[in-house]
Image (tube, coloured by chain):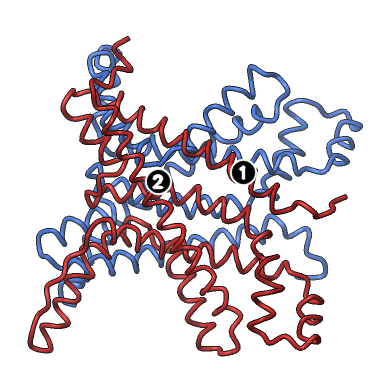
Amino acid sequence: MEIIIESLPRLLGGAVITLEITFLSVLLGFVLAIPLAVMRVSRLRCLWMPVYAFTFYFRGTPLLVQIFLIYYGSGQFQVFLDSVGLWHFFKSPWFCAVLALTLNTAAYSAEIFRGGIQGVPRGEVEAAQACGMSGLLLYRRIVIPKALRIAWPAYTNEVIFLLQASSLVSIITVMDITGVAREISARSFAFYELFLAAAAIYLVLVYGILWIFKRIENRINAYLQVGQH
Amino acid sequence: MSFFDLQGYGWLLLQGAKLTLYVGICSMVLAMGLGLLGVLCKFSRSSLVRFAADTYTTVIRGIPELILILLVYYGVPTLIQDVTAKFGQPVYVSFDPFVAGVATIGFIYGAFSTEVFRGAYLAVPRGQVEAARACGMSRALTFRRVILPQMMRFALPGLGNVWMVLIKATALISVIQLPELMRNADIAARAPREPFTFFFAASLIYLLITIGSNLVQQWAEKRASRGIITD
């Protein structure tokens, strides 16, 4: 028990890293996923096929392979990466972790948002077209907001998965919650104490984020609730 | 072409892939067993049993797989040791990575299967259950004859998803040194110093497993709904 209290500050420090990596990847992944989803529903072959290949690869392979490909795999191209000035980034485990998680969540989110876009009622699109909207304006004002509302519950799940998946970055030496728990337990042999403490912190984070996302869901769907104030 | 030259390590990857599939199938069987048990508990008449099942699915789905794998592989033996030491005689146990891996992955995805089965259970029309009860079947017999066969059909798409996530999650067992695909790719990548080539090759094998599983799932769903009229 003492060892848990003793290592609590470091575990909480790890929690900050976990949240930081998750937040960055979710944000960047979201920014990537929206255009990818729009491209994915396009009828133009040169638009949807590359997105299809990208999502197929990143959803069909384990995240651990993707992390290793980027972190260890980049070493094979060190000379090239050095010559274009990118090696500085790829030798940092933190950067590779965020890059891998971003690409992974972008692939999953793009598929979720694609479902959302396809779920937008035809009538709403036709009404907007009748009002003279088209192209980007139609997407910005009508399709994307509606698609996001439809996709929100599934997207919530994806964010929760990403938070949990971020524990894999400890394998490439990033000191997140899992990383801290592994390091301290390997030194002190207090395995179950540390891993149970880490599990408890994850539980709190997961259900905390779930609560926040539920609040957002209620808010963006507020207009659907009749007679509630 | 030197890029795809696996320099004689190809067989190591294939051996790993075999173990990955084996671990995956064993875990899936365990997960489905636990899922069925879980769903029976979720609809149990005892509120204590229902509470236990809810706790199982809520807690397990909120903890990363990696933490649970480490907890089972490293934590449980030390816990047993500490507890038995309190009673005088410490017992030293250690787990085989295969057993620890299958047990953990099966236990985690048992929680997900429980939720899948729960949805499938609710999808079986209530009238049929009432009709079976009216015919004099007991609760157990109703479950076996009426609910279970239909539930399996409703559960297939969800179980397919669980399998897809599960087979990718087996890569995490490489952390406790089980020589499955991921671990073997790691070993193979070291000697020739070509990590990208080997991890990419491993990822393609995972991709093949995914494609194969997709085909099997499509076939199974089609087969399960033969004789069902849809409009």
Chain identifier of the residue bearing label 1 in the image: A
Q: Quadrant of residue B215?
A: top right
Estimate the x, y position of residue A28 in percent, counting from the top left.
Answer: 48, 37
Query: Which residue is outermost to the top?
Result: B1
Residue position for label 2 = B21
Q: Which chain is red?
A: B
Left or right of residue B224: residue B101:
left
**Mark number, residue B29:** none
The correct choice, above or below, for B209 with respect to A84 in the image is below
Q: Quadrant of residue A25?
A: top left
Q: Is residue A89 visible?
A: no
Q: Which chain is blue?
A: A
Is B122 placed left or right of B68 in the picture?
Answer: right
In the displayed orientation, state which residue is furthest to the right.
A130
Q: Position of residue A74 (x, y in %)?
A: 28, 25
Nearer to us of marks 1 and 2 is 2
Residue at 16% x, 62% y: name it.
A185
